[in-house]
Each structure stands twice: as structure tokens, then as C-alpha cells.
Amino acid sequence: MNLFIDAIAWILDPANWSGPGSIPQRIWEHVWITAVVLLIASAIALPTGALIGHTGRGREPAVRISGGLRALPTLGVLTLFGIWIGIGLAAPIIALVILAIPPLLAGAYAGFESVDRRTIDAARAVGMRESQIVGRVELPLGMPIVVGGIRSATLQIIATATLAAYIADDGLGRFIFAGLKTRDYAEMLGGSILVILLALVADGILALTQRRVVPAGVRASRITDLRSRPTRSRAVVGQPIHEGNPE
Amino acid sequence: MTWLWSNLDLVGELTLVHLALSVPAIILSFVISVPIGWLAHRYRWSRGVLLSLCALLYAIPSLALFVALPPITGLALRSPVNLVIALTLYGIAVIVRTAADAFDAVEPDVRQSATAIGYSAAGRFWGVELPLAGPVLLSGLRVVVVSTVSLATVGAVIGVESLGSLFTDGFQRGIQAEILTGIVATIVLALVLDWLCVVGGRLLMPWSRADAATSRARLSTPVKQADTV
């Protein structure tokens, strides 16, 4: 426990709050990298995922790609790009974008896919254009899951950006690697605590957003659902019943 | 390729070390999570608390957790046990959520029928709820298998040997083939363990294949209706 006191003393030490490589500068770098990577990866993955979820086409390869990319070891991708591109910010940013795409893609297609097909049929029946169905029916209804994807992507980026300090001189991970080299556990632990706080704050904000984007109509129906849920409601309302004729 | 042939021993050895790190973590997290997930499913008050704790745990960046654990456990930073504990914690964070969902998905009718024909609470858990939750539990386990094998490589930067050592060593010495070998070896190891889980699942739950087929048919019918419009 003594080590934690040392780490907190390290965080609170005014000497660490100014000059090059100070705590505010590292936090800023970390947030900035996370934001840039999230923007680039979202620009690629969200429209693609929305298209897959809307049309239902290309689902299998998307599942396979996002599943396969998940097996990719982050450190391996980082060091590989580090060798290819050299020291600097480009390598970690490209590596981080690649690693952030699977959760974003999965969130986007799962979100669009989760919308009840009958709701979409109804929207089409009342005369909505395809673009209106995407923007005004599927997007709002699928939004909580899409934001869920953004949430896990953000956590992944914050975590991997820490690791990226291994190949670049940026972000809060610097404190961990600097402390590791000089055997300064207070600095390592202090840096770790700051990263954990940053991740928890980001997660909290996105969790609140995720709750906020649930459309009012959906929220209302959910509450009544909880209070009186007949055991057979979903089977009767949701699917055609196949009694006695197994397929 | 030449690098790989001349270092086959090293890769083989590191693969075994990697297995020794990830397999205990995977098994431990599964064994610990299923009862916790069941608790989260069974009691409404515990659900919010347990699932929020898991979400928090999951949010902690791995490298930071590796550094923050030793002062709590009293282990050395470079101890493999430290890494196994951290990997187990991440596994728990994932499986508890899936396990709670899996037990939730067991039809209330089935549960009531089991009680009605005389199952005790424990008998119902082992004989009815666990087998029915099995396929979903397996899917959670598969996610953990892949992520644990991948995450174990991170330990290399703090000095815990694994296939990740190929990344740190390859980066420092500028050997691209070494890093590529590490990436491929990690993915292959994850896929092999994942495949073992699938095979194990089929042997233990022969009914789950037929089940998956019908549920897929059920899912795809409404989609087809929408397409023909």
C-alpha cells in the first residue's frame, strides 16, 4: 500500500505538472491521439457497418473480419508498424485505427441489424424513402448499440495508446516505460493510475451517452415491459408459432 | 522465413510458455465467472452491482493493470503469476456478463416445469439451467480464449516472457520476420484453442448444433420477408 501513497505523491508533485513531458501534456497527448484515431476509424467503420446492417449483405465477411482482427495482438501490430514507418506518431495512429475498426464495425452492423424487420417494413409501407429509413428509423433505434461499439473502441484505443508509448514518445504510457527503465515504481504506478482514471472517465461519459440515446418511445415501452411481462408474450408477439409442425 | 527456420526452437518454447500463461487464466476465469454470473442472474440487487464492477474492470487498460496489481498482491512485477491474475480478471469481466445473459435466456417455462416435476434448486441448476445456458457460455468462453491469448503478449513489455517477447525483441533489433512470426503464432494459437473449445462444446453439448440451426432459420425468415418487398 505504501507504493500507492508514493504514486499519489508523485502525481501531486508540482514538479511533474510543468515543463516538457509533464502530466497535463501527457494527458493532452493521450486524449488527442484517442480522439484522432476514433474519428478516422469511425469514418471508415461506421458507414460500412451501417451499410452491412441495412442491406444484410456482406454480413459473413464482416463478422469474420471483425472477429479475426480481434485475435490480432495489439503489441505485434504496434511494433510492426513501428519498424515499417519509424519512430513518430504515424505508426501508432495507423496501428490504433486498424485495432479500433472491429468493435466499431461490429457495433454499427449489430445496431442496424437489431432493428425489428417489421418496423422497417412499416416505415417502408408508410412511404419512407430508403434514406429516411436509415436516418430516421434504423439509426435512432440502433443508436444504443452503435454507441456501445464506440464505447468499447474508445476503451481499446485508450489502452493501446498507453502501449503505443513503447514505440513513440507520446501519451501517459511514457510514465510507465520511463519508470520501468529507471526502476521508479512511483512514476510507473502514478502513470498507471492516471491512465485508469482517464479510461474510467471516458467509459462513464460514453455509458451515460449510451443511456441518453435510447429513443423516448423505446424507453417507455421497456418500462412497462419490466413490470408485467407475461411469460409467453415474446413467443406470441414476436414470431410465428409453429405448433406441431417442426421444420 | 529463414529467421523462422533458424529460430524454430525459440518459437516453440515461447509458444509453450504462452500456453502456460493463458490456459490457466482462461480456465480460472471460466470457473470463477459462472457462479458469479448465476448470482447476477438470480438476484436483481446483485445484478447491477456485479455487472457494473465487471464493466469497470474491463475498462482498465491492460498495461496499467499489470503495473497496479503487484503492490496489491505483493508479487514481483515480472512474475508470471501477476500476469495470470490480470488475465483472469479480464476474463471474469467478460464471462460474468455473458453468463448472466445465458442464465437469463433460459425460458421461465422450462425452469418452472423443472421445478414442477421435482427438481431441487441444485439439481435444476446442474440438470437444466447449466446445460441450456451452455451454448451461450461457450460463446463467451471463446471470446475470452481469443482475447486472453492476444492480451498475454502485452506482458512482454514489462518483462514477462511469452510470444510477445518476439515483438519486443524484434522491434529492438529491427527484425521484421520475428514480429510477423509472433503475430502469426499468436493468431494460430488463439484459433487452435478456439477450435478446441468448439470441439469440446460439441462433445459436451450434442444438442447445441441442431439448436443453432433452428435458431438461425428462425432469425433469417423475417429478414427474407423484408428483402422480397
Image (cartoon, coloured by chain):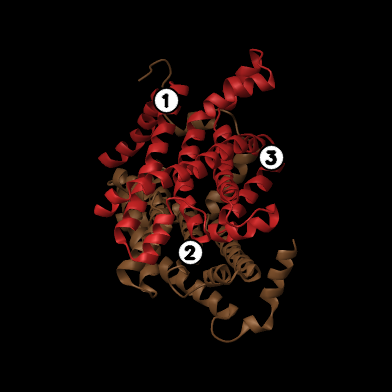
Chain colours: A brown, B red
Label 3: few (<14), some or many (≥20) within 10 Å? few
Give whichever of B224, A210 is nearer the camera.
Answer: A210
The vertical placement of B64 against A225, above or below, is below
State the image coordinates of residue B96 (x, y, percent, origin top left): 59, 41
The vertical placement of B58 against A163, above or below, is above
What residue is drawn where x is 40% and y is 43%?
B190
Question: SS class of the residue under badge 2?
Answer: helix
Q: Amino acid at mark 1?
A: Arg
What residue is drawn where x is 45% and y is 46%?
B149
Which quadrant: the C terminus of chain A? top left
Of badges 3 and 1, nearer the viewer stands 1
Give whichever of B75, A191 is nearer the camera.
Answer: B75
Single out the residue that lies furthest toward the top.
B117
Does the image show residue B41? yes
According to the picture, the residue beneath numbered tag 2 turns out to be A163
State the image coordinates of residue A120 (x, y, percent, origin top left): 37, 46
According to the picture, the residue beneath numbered tag 1 turns out to be B202
Label 2: few (<14), some or many (≥20) within 10 Å? many
Does the image show residue A100? no
Question: Do tag 1 and tag 2 residues touch (Cβ < 8 Å)?
Answer: no
According to the picture, the residue beneath numbered tag 3 turns out to be B44
Q: Amino acid at mark 3?
A: Arg
Of badges 1 and 2, nearer the viewer stands 2
Q: Chain of mark 1?
A: B
What residue is drawn where x is 57% and y is 58%?
A207
Which quadrant: the N terminus of chain A? bottom right
The vertical placement of B22 against B205, above or below, is below
Distance in Å between CA atoms under marks 3 and 2: 38 Å
